[in-house]
Image (tube, rainbow, N blue to C red):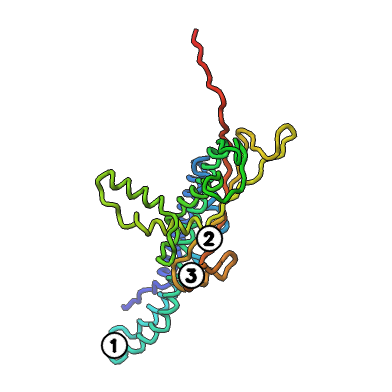
Amino acid sequence: MNTRAKPRGNRSHRGGWIKGLAAALVAAGAVAAAYAAVWLAGPPAAWLFRAITSPLFVYCGALLAACGVLFAVLAGVLWQAGRPYRGRRRAEEGNVLIEFALVLPFLLLLSLLMAQTSLVMVGNVCVHYSAFCAARAAIVTVPKDYGAGEPRNLLRDFSDETSKLHKMRMAAAWALSGVSCGSEEITASQDALADGIGRFFSVQGIEPPAWADQGLARRFTYAMDHTEVTVAPPEVDEDDDDEYFDEHEDLHVTVRHTLYLAVPTAAKLFAMFPGGVELDFGDGEYGTVVTASCTLPNEGVQDYVDIERFP
């Protein structure tokens, strides 16, 4: 008596869907856990929570996921298309090569988009961190007395290197040096940072690394030239002068940075969206404007010394 085995195609197909759904749930749980961990970290990680919940980060995450799914679908289609030709005569291998040549440009474009999207997500986090650094610099520079031009708790929009706002912009630019452009077409005008790091390694008897030379100076120059820092005016107080900040008053600092888009082809596509700009150096260099804010309380300056008295 002959018996036939029941086909298992439906069961196998159902098992594949279950595994895919389980993987998606695990990934969603991991992302939710990461968000919860950052949120529970409290004030020290508040800037990071704002970064990963910002519209740009969420948009880039969705775009990255969509490109990954489309990449997997195209790779799967290409794999399935070549199945009938596997194990056949060598003369029929040309059909597989033609199909591969047709799909390859789309796979390459998706790869470039995924790479640029990942860099923009990292750059968005760095811009939010730079806003935190600028706010941290603000709460210690605003209370200082810079002379007649900028006395204690007074902030003026000076462009020279002795202003309080310049100190904040330097703090923000230093945090953005890692994601800035180091092209040789940028004239390095900020050499003090590179010189200081070079002296640090020299004092330790270590030869300065290659990145501590002109490459770092060019990146810092780009960050300084493409970063704008603004501080919201002080709150209106009937008892005090409106131009002066009160001690422990919240300082709202905003950083606006033109993030460099480094991936060819994908950079031009990203520049077509709102915020995209063509940079003023090189040929075909693009960037996108990213804005982040941070609020910290003004520390104030204590004019007196507490004298401790013991019984």
Q: Earlier in the sequence, mark 3 or mark 1?
A: 1
Q: Is residue 59 visible?
A: yes
Q: Nearer the viewer, mark 3 or mark 1?
A: 3
Instruction: Specify the farthest residue to the top.
Output: 311
Helix or strand or loop: what does disc 3 sit on?
loop
Q: CA distance from mark 3 to mark 2?
A: 12 Å
Q: Amino acid at mark 1?
A: Arg
Residue hosting label 3: 285
Q: Amino acid at mark 2?
A: Thr
**Residue 133 % position (x, y):** 50, 46
Q: CA distance from mark 3 to mark 1?
A: 48 Å
- How many residues crowd mark 2 within 10 Å: few (<14), some (14–19), many (20+)? many
**Residue 83 % position (x, y):** 35, 81
Residue hosting label 2: 258
Q: Earlier in the sequence, mark 3 or mark 2?
A: 2
Q: Quadrant of the N terminus?
A: bottom left
Tell whether label 1 touches label 2 (CB within 8 Å): no
Q: Earlier in the sequence, mark 2 or mark 1?
A: 1
**Residue 182 % position (x, y):** 41, 62
Helix or strand or loop: what does disc 1 sit on?
loop
Horizontally, is 232 left or right of 44 in the view?
right
Helix or strand or loop: what does disc 2 sit on?
strand
Q: Amino acid at mark 3?
A: Glu
